[in-house]
Image: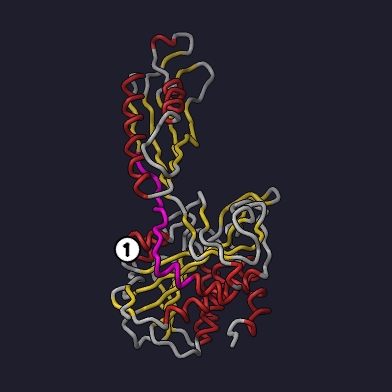
């Protein structure tokens, strides 16, 4: 019996409505109200929170073991056609739509476990997952699934992967303190912008003894206010990316070592702080196998892509970092998405929403068949 097909037209309509509601991180009020209304009308028990618009929807609370899906709700603030406005260019409206209709498809199904749907704020700021963890939304969870639209360059329409291997990202924001002087007397000063130029070259020479990929680059540099003065300070941002969490640890250590050395070489004071961090995906074999079965059942074995590797990041992986015993995975959904994620003109084949909803529904049914104990299959 296909639990999703009767909802097909409603799925596409809901997506369009959520797309128009686009709200930036921590301001997802209308989006949250829209979703909670549909879920509460269907019979879900809703838990909201005072400090943000994230929420949890549950049914069948008889079981002490919880299987869960997570969706993100926020949009980006972008310039679109000459105007700055909230814009869903990362597919969170699509993710919320698919998780919503997986929930609606299962509400009348007999399930052995408690079913929990986590609608998360502020993924784009990499803060929402940590807030939902703080709210104890992972209590008793043994399985957590997620889904994300994938660009056409990674996966075509009609295919899906049981795991997206996002990398880890770290943002370092820092200051270079030199000595100001008149531009006519450069020998009296110590130019922090010249130190920044040396720093740019130095970080390009970082080499780690690892097999997986990594990058570090300067993405922001600001200093000076007039043409005839050497400034006293310059502000910079470094973007660090690594395929694994272990490589990221080494990369941060080596970058800090370079900052110290450049400071000593240029006789400047260089300080930095971590301004943002997201962990890399850690593959969970059981979760991946369950997702693979769900994709095969929904799209056919020939449309299963073993792994979707991407240089991007996702705060979904804070859940598995904080709770490594939970079986978790994020499904990659092929949808012919162009020109790319976060592009203000992003578009995709909306029929993929039907595919994704079917996969998520089948996934929870697969997970529910297992007996769970502390996140592991017991028989």
**Colour mapping:** secondary structure
Residue 75 position in % (x across, y down):
56, 59
Q: What residue span does the magenta drawing correspond to?
A: 273-291
- Secondary structure type for disc 1: loop
Foreground: 143 or 258?
143
Q: 9 above or below 152?
A: below
**Image quadrant in which the C terminus is located:** bottom left
Label 1 Cα neighbours within 10 Å, binned few <14 / some 14-19 / many ≥20: some
What residue sits 31% from the left and 28% below the top? Answer: 260
Whether residue 138 appears in magenta in the rendering, the answer is no
Q: Residue at x 41, y 22 (%)?
A: 195
Q: Is residue 34 visible?
A: no
On screen, residue 20 versus residue 34, left or right, reads: right
Residue appearing at x 47%, y 81% in the figure: 365
Q: Which of the 4 image quadrants contains residue 209?
A: top left
Toward the right, the furthest residue is 81
Q: Name the spot of residue 112 as percent of width and height, x first.
A: 39, 87
Whether residue 126 sits left or right of residue 299 in the image: it is left
Between 188 and 66, the one lying in front of the other is 66
* Placement of the N terminus among the 4 image quadrants: bottom right
Residue 58: which quarter of the image?
bottom left
Depicted 6 relative to depicted 334: above or below: below
The structure residue drawn at horizontal position 52% and vertical position 57%, both measured from the top left corner, is: 308
Say whether residue 168 is visible: yes
355 on left or right of 253 = right
**As rendered, which of 305 and 109 lies closer to the eye?**
305
Left/right placement of residue 156 relative to residue 37 reads: right
Please name the residue that numbered disc 1 is placed on.
324
């Amino acid at each position: 019996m296909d639990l999703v097909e009767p909802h097909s037209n409603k799925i596409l309509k809901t997506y369009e409505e959520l797309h128009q509601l686009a709200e930036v991180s921590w301001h997802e009020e209308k989006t949250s109200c829209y979703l909670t209304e549909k879920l509460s009308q269907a019979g879900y028990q809703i838990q909201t929170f005072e400090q943000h618009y994230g929420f949890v929807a549950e049914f069948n609370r008889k079981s002490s073991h919880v299987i869960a899906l997570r969706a993100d709700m926020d949009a980006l603030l972008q310039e679109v056609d000459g105007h700055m406005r909230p814009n869903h260019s990362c597919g969170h409206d699509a993710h919320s739509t698919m998780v919503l209709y997986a929930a609606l498809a299962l509400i009348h199904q007999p399930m052995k476990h408690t079913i929990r749907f986590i609608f998360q704020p502020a993924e784009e700021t990499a803060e929402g997952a940590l807030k939902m963890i703080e709210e104890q939304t992972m209590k008793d969870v043994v399985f957590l699934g997620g889904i994300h639209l994938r660009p056409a360059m990674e996966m075509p329409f009609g295919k899906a992967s049981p795991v997206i291997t996002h990398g880890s990202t770290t943002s370092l924001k820092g200051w270079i303190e030199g000595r100001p002087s008149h531009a006519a007397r450069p020998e009296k000063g110590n130019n922090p912008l010249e130190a920044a130029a040396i720093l740019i070259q130095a970080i390009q020479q970082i080499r780690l003894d690892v097999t997986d990929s990594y990058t570090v680059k300067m993405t922001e540099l600001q200093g000076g206010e007039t043409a005839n003065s050497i400034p006293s300070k310059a502000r910079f941002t470094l973007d660090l990316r690594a395929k694994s969490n272990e490589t990221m640890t080494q990369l941060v250590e080596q970058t800090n070592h370079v900052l110290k050395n450049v400071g000593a070489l240029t006789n400047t004071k260089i300080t930095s702080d971590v301004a943002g961090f997201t962990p890399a995906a850690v593959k969970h074999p059981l979760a991946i196998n369950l997702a693979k079965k769900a994709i095969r059942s929904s799209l056919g074995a020939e449309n299963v892509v073993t792994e979707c590797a991407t240089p991007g990041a996702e705060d979904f992986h804070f859940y598995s970092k904080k709770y490594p015993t939970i079986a978790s995975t994020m499904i990659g959904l092929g949808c012919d998405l162009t020109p790319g994620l976060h592009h203000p003109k992003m578009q995709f084949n909306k029929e993929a929403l039907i595919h994704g909803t079917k996969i998520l529904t089948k996934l929870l049914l697969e997970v529910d068949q297992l007996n769970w104990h502390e996140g592991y299959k017991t028989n």
